[in-house]
Image (spheres, rainbow, N blue to C red):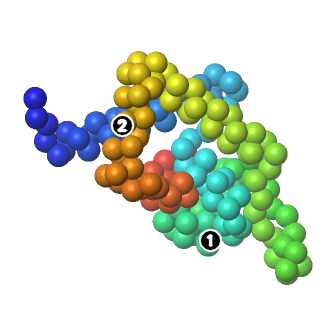
């Protein structure tokens, strides 16, 4: 049975959504009820050097105001803090806290387990082939982890 291009896009999105929803639910069951994908994208961006609201907004392709709201949520939850800037004593820079890094590591471990679950369902060779095909079609890194753009709208 042949599918349309739109069906392919929806299947790929469905696979992504299945993984993300499963990871979010498992994080919640481990006590991290408030984690959303945009929070992970933001913390990864901050850890990679986006240490201001302006820079975070650029990396997430959202407005500075949206970045500031995201930062406020992350700070409220204790996942991000501000610290002194070693280059400019008047400036504060964003830093991921140990709790924020713990959440990111926990999420990574959950995604590894979810990948193993998929391998158990279709076979490791089939999953490896799927991954190779996706790399061939979308490139080795089709989406930067710190540039979700349209995903960043979920600030919840």
Q: Nearer the viewer, residue 123 or 114?
A: 123
Mark 2 vs mark 1, foreground winner is: 2
What quarter of the picture does the C terminus occupy? Answer: top right
Residue 60 sits above or below residue 1 on the image: below
Residue 30 % position (x, y): 68, 24
Q: Residues within 10 Å of mark 1 (few under 14, many from 20)?
A: some
Q: Nearer the viewer, residue 4 or 79?
A: 4
Q: Residues within 10 Å of mark 2 (few under 14, many from 20)?
A: few
Q: Quadrant of residue 83?
A: bottom right
The residue pinned by badge 1 equals: 55
Tell me: 7 left or right of 13.
left
Tell me: 123 left or right of 32.
left
> What is the secondary structure assignment of the residue under circle 2?
helix
Q: Residue at x 81, y 70 (%)?
A: 92
Q: Residue at x 39, y 56 (%)?
A: 139
**Residue 81 appears in the rendering:** yes
Tell me: 70 left or right of 3.
right
Q: Residue at x 33, y 44 (%)?
A: 133
Q: Earlier in the sequence, mark 2 or mark 1?
A: 1
Residue 46 % position (x, y): 68, 60
The residue pinned by badge 2 equals: 130
**Residue 65 appears in the rendering:** no
Residue 87 sits above or below residue 49 on the image: below
């Amino acid at each position: 049975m042949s599918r349309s291009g739109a069906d392919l896009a929806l299947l790929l999105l469905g696979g992504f959504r299945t993984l993300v929803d499963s990871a979010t639910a498992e994080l919640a069951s481990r006590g991290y009820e408030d984690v959303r994908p945009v929070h992970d994208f933001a913390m990864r961006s901050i850890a990679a050097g986006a240490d201001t609201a302006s820079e975070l907004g650029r990396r997430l392709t959202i407005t500075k105001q949206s970045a500031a709201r995201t930062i406020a949520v992350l700070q409220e939850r204790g996942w991000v803090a501000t610290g002194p800037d070693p280059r400019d004593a008047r400036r504060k820079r964003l830093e991921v806290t140990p709790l924020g890094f713990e959440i990111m590591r926990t999420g990574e471990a959950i995604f590894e387990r979810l990948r193993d679950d998929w391998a158990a369902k279709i076979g490791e060779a089939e999953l490896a082939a799927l991954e190779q095909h996706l790399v061939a079609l979308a490139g080795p890194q089709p989406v930067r982890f710190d540039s979700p753009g349209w995903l960043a709208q979920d600030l919840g």
